[in-house]
Amino acid sequence: MGKSVKDIDKKYVMNTYRRYDLEITEGMGANCYDVDGREYIDLSSGIGVNSLGFCEMGWVASVTQQVCKLNHTSNLFYSQPCATLAKSLCERTGYSKVFFANSGAEANEGAIKIARKYSYDKYGKGRDKIVTLVNSFHGRTVTTLSATGQEVFHDYFFPFTQGFEYVDAGDIDALSKLVAKGDVCAVMMEFVQGEGGVIPLDKDFVQKTAELCAAKDLLMIADEVQTGVGRTGKFLAGEHYGVKADITTLAKGLGGGLPIGAVLTAEKCASTLGFSMHGTTFGGNPIVCAGANYVLARVDEDFLFSVEQKGEYFQEKLARLDGVESVSGLGLMIGVRIKGTTSSEFVKDGISRGIIMLTAKDKVRLLPPLTITYDEIDKAVAIIDSMLSAYREVK
């Protein structure tokens, strides 16, 4: 008998992930199955990527049709799926231009380059610092690690990219003092700090930051890699805050399961990058764009309303459970603080009981498919409740 997938993986794949003891073989919607045929409710959606769940049939058909027609061309040529996606995204969001990349980190890299080039063109050298928030997460490249406002990520890979400063979320005075130095070109933030614990920012702070950026001609960058494309019940989480950033980055759920990143720019910085100033071989790939075009068609206003309603329903049911200390988040981006155990142990235990969840520091993070049903939410809550009951009995 040959070696198992687990054995092969351990031998040949770099050990950069602490994998759970689960091999997923197939799935549909919010449900998936392991190698033994056991069923799981997926409340992770591949860390927010499978926005329509596993293998939604319309999405599968759109991608399959494109696979059979044209797989790749490079950005030296035009392609219909890419152009259609660009038009749809810009018209949907009110942005002027978009650059397509392959991931959230790559999208954030593009946003950083645009911000620094915009400032250089108008003000010359020396106005290049970008302020991000303590507890933020912006990616794992050397530059986006530097942009990430968590000390735990600032190790090993020296020297990190220079030019980043950090302020506490909500501290508009500290931000104003940094800006007053005259060397800042942009402020970058997640409206809901996902990896940092599913913590929504204060609305007043976000709006004052937007006002400060406008007054000082700084670019406001919204990292909506995790919050965008309907995750919070709005197409962009910035809608909850009544602000429109100069640059918004997207990834994760946009492709519905395929790798994509997008940098959306307002008119003031839409032409900042010219020929040969930025690029990527796979960005705007026809197959990926076909999947994203289908996602955009599905995520209409009625769909978004349903996400908002299901998010409220899910959060309310979780908050009533004995053993849940607190619930945070927006829409179907939910953080749960559990009493009596660690988030990592709770998630591990959940897999043994047929439910897939995530962690976000000391919280359990839930990013279910946006298509999850109320029955599936009820079933998931019942499993979580049974887990909490077991912990209470142990005590």
Image (cartoon, rainbow, N blue to C red):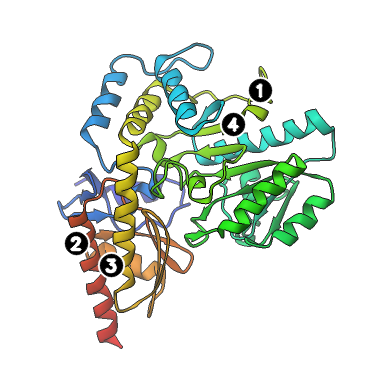
Q: Amino acid at mark 1?
A: Ser
Judging by the rendered image, the residue that carries numbered circle 4 is 265
Q: Quadrant of residue 18?
A: bottom left
| Secondary structure category for the residue under label 1 | loop
User: Of the residues tagged 2 and 1, which is closer to the observer?
Assistant: 1
Residue 213 visible (yes or no): yes
Residue 387 drawn at (x, y percent): 26, 73
Q: Amino acid at mark 4?
A: Thr
* Spatial separation of the CA atoms under disc 1 and disc 4: 9 Å
Residue 271 badge: 1
Quarter occupied by the C terminus: bottom left
How dense is the environment of label 2, judged by Cα within 10 Å: few (below 14), some, or many (20 and up)? Answer: some
- Pick whichever of labels 3 and 2 is earlier in the sequence: 3
Q: Amino acid at mark 3?
A: Lys
Q: Residue at x 37, y 70 (%)?
A: 345
Residue 330 drawn at (x, y percent): 42, 56
| Secondary structure category for the residue under label 2 | helix
How dense is the environment of label 4, judged by Cα within 10 Å: few (below 14), some, or many (20 and up)? Answer: many
Are discs 1 and 4 less than 8 Å apart at CB? no
How dense is the environment of label 1, judged by Cα within 10 Å: few (below 14), some, or many (20 and up)? Answer: few
